[in-house]
Image (spheres, rainbow, N blue to C red):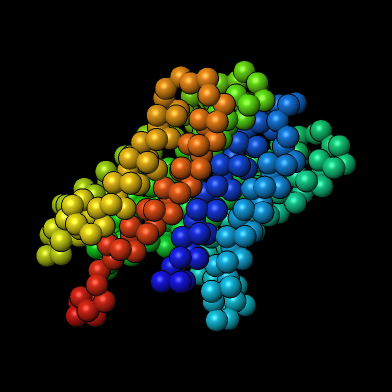
Amino acid sequence: MSKDFTLIIFVVLATLSSGLLGSAALAAVRGSARIPLKAIVSSGAVSLAVGAGLSLATLGHPELFLGALSHVGTGIFWQLFGSIVCFTGAVVFLVLSFRDDEGPALKVFAVLAAAGALIAVVGVGRSFVMPWRLAWASWSSVGVFLGFALSSVACFSLFLNQYFEEHQSIPAWLRGVAVLLCPLSLVWYLTSIGLSSEPEAGEILSRALIGGAAPIFWAMALGGVLAPVLCLSVRSKGRFVGLAGSLVSAVGAGAFQYLLLLLDTPAWQFFVR
């Protein structure tokens, strides 16, 4: 379980990094003068670096991780590729910032860093797409992880706008995707299992909703999914509401990964099939 735990930490930190870098990219594109972009971009890069470092530390031969670059279809490839893109964008952004460059390149590399973090999160979801394992057979898991990441972006943007009194609203498209993508993908995930003709489908669904995995599922659904939706949907003057929503989204991503690990087909069934 120790290796699983470090991977859960990775997705939590990658989702948090997405929130930090995504909100920084949005602020940079809008030309914000109050939000401390250098500090936020640095924090986002460090968050992803710590998560990636912990994941690499669990491998017996970390150098073999680079072999993932030759397997484009794997989730590990996209996690690695996204991390590289993120670090490249963040480093160049910081170099330009310290040189007081205010040109369009600053915005481009801020967006690049945010895109890299989001790609890394998508890579986590791709790792849980395995058609031969019922609990991991749906592409909906990608939507759930990406939904948590975009929810973190929207909530942290809300926090920054309120805390630094920017008086700018979150773009309607970002608010809409952040509110809808994660819940709809989660419903899609449960429906895909419920409609399956596999004999263990009922058992997996039961374990998720009322069985041993139910506390994780409902804590994730009511906390990780519903709480950020309320943060973005209900008008509040509290400065730290958005910050709480962003953090809860990151924890929700980790809870969903833990849920997927709990619901995976037992080893004896896997080998019998």
Instruction: Give the position of the N terminus as an image quadrant.
Output: bottom left
Instruction: Give the position of the C terminus as an image quadrant.
Output: bottom left
Taking the spot 62% from the left edge, 43% from the top edge, the residue there is 21
Residue 143 appears anywhere in the view: no
Q: Residue furthest right?
A: 99
Residue 267, above or below 260: below
Residue 123 position within the rendered picture, expressed as x and y whole percent measured from the top left: 48, 57
- Near-viewer residue (26 or 232): 232
Residue 272 position within the rendered picture, expressed as x and y whole percent measured from the top left: 19, 80
Residue 13 position within the rendered picture, expressed as x and y whole percent measured from the top left: 55, 53
Residue 211 position within the rendered picture, expressed as x and y whole percent measured from the top left: 19, 57
- Place residue 97 in its image quadrant: top right
- Place residue 267 in its image quadrant: bottom left
Taking the spot 64% from the left edge, 48% from the top edge, the residue there is 44
Tell me how many marks there are. 0
Taking the spot 65% from the left edge, 37% from the top edge, the residue there is 24
- Near-viewer residue (218 or 198): 218
